[in-house]
Amino acid sequence: MKISVVGTGYVGLVSGTCFAETGIITSCVDIDQEKIEKLNQGIVPIYEPGLEKMIKRNVEKDRLFFTTSIEESLKGSEAVFIAVGTPPDEDGSADLQYVLAVAREIATHMTDYKLIITKSTVPVGTAEKVRAAINEVMATRDDKIPFDVASNPEFLKEGDAIDDFLKPDRIVVGTDSERAEKLMKRLYKPFLLNGHPLLIMDIPSAELTKYAANSMLATKISFMNDIANLCEIVGADVNSVRKGIGSDSRIGNKFIYPGVGYGGSCFPKDVKALIKTGIENNHSLEILKSV
């Protein structure tokens, strides 16, 4: 089986390399020629424990390739992952211009059936926009190539991304096609054999799951910081309180450490994007506004 991964940022590079590690021929694409040249030389643009050795191993075994050409990458690929950036706009919404540009380029060059999968963190409705962008290009072509669209959000933690990918808590797949579902199950077969759950759902639910998960974790952090402030006022020990509530299996002991607040590249933008999705659908997410 061969797949393509468009985008060699954090998510694309880790995902592509880990797929190759499972034996899948993987072609990673990026428009940044310098980055691709360095990757072909074994120079990795990000630091993630174990990633450099894994890239080297799979390149040597002819399972992992790097190119600037989507057209070249699509040859023989059954599935194409879109893993490009979705930076926040000024209003907090996710900027989908790069995702849709990739979709159009895929539509321009594909010559046989493809399953196009959004791996980037994208708001509800993105898959339909990807489908529309592809159909728009297809309308200008003489030949009509069949395709499906699916959602497969990532759940990777920096510093532990390889384990998160190879030993996932769950694999979320959103699809509305039996053919796409079968292909995704074949793609993730090694994970299923190891007992990792594959959750098949509709596409909007899959798109929302990523934002909901990150927003829940951000909420836990914000809640604990609020409790820490109250502890200081009333003379309580927040660490004792944390242990007391964290021992409840319904709550758990993760993401309830008091500190400066949540940060990183995902939580702030994802919370804002989910609030924006609510606004666009006439629903005010009051808890997340407080978070």
Image (cartoon, helix red, strand yellow):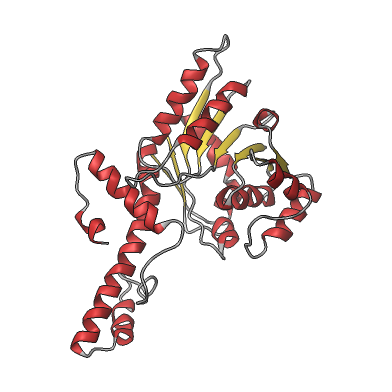
Instruction: Tell me the quarter of the image containing the N terminus.
Output: top right
Answer whether residue 176 is visible to the viewer in this image.
Answer: no
Q: Is residue 144 left or right of residue 229?
A: right
Q: Is residue 206 left or right of residue 65?
A: left
Answer whether residue 281 is visible to the viewer in this image.
Answer: yes
Instruction: Tell me the quarter of the image containing the C terminus.
Output: bottom left
The quadrant in which residue 166 appears is bottom right
113 and 126: which is toward the camera? 126
212 and 284: which is toward the camera? 284
At which x and y percent is residue 278?
A: 25, 44
Residue found farthest to the top: 142
At which x and y percent is residue 270?
A: 38, 52
At which x and y percent is residue 140?
A: 52, 12
* Number of numbered callouts drawn: 0
111 and 13: which is toward the camera? 13
Residue found farthest to the front: 90
At which x and y percent is residue 113?
A: 58, 24
The quadrant in which residue 202 appears is top left
* Residue at screen point 28% across, 88% down: 237
Residue found farthest to the right: 60
* Residue at screen point 68% across, 36% down: 68
134 and 31: which is toward the camera? 31
The quadrant in which residue 144 appears is top right
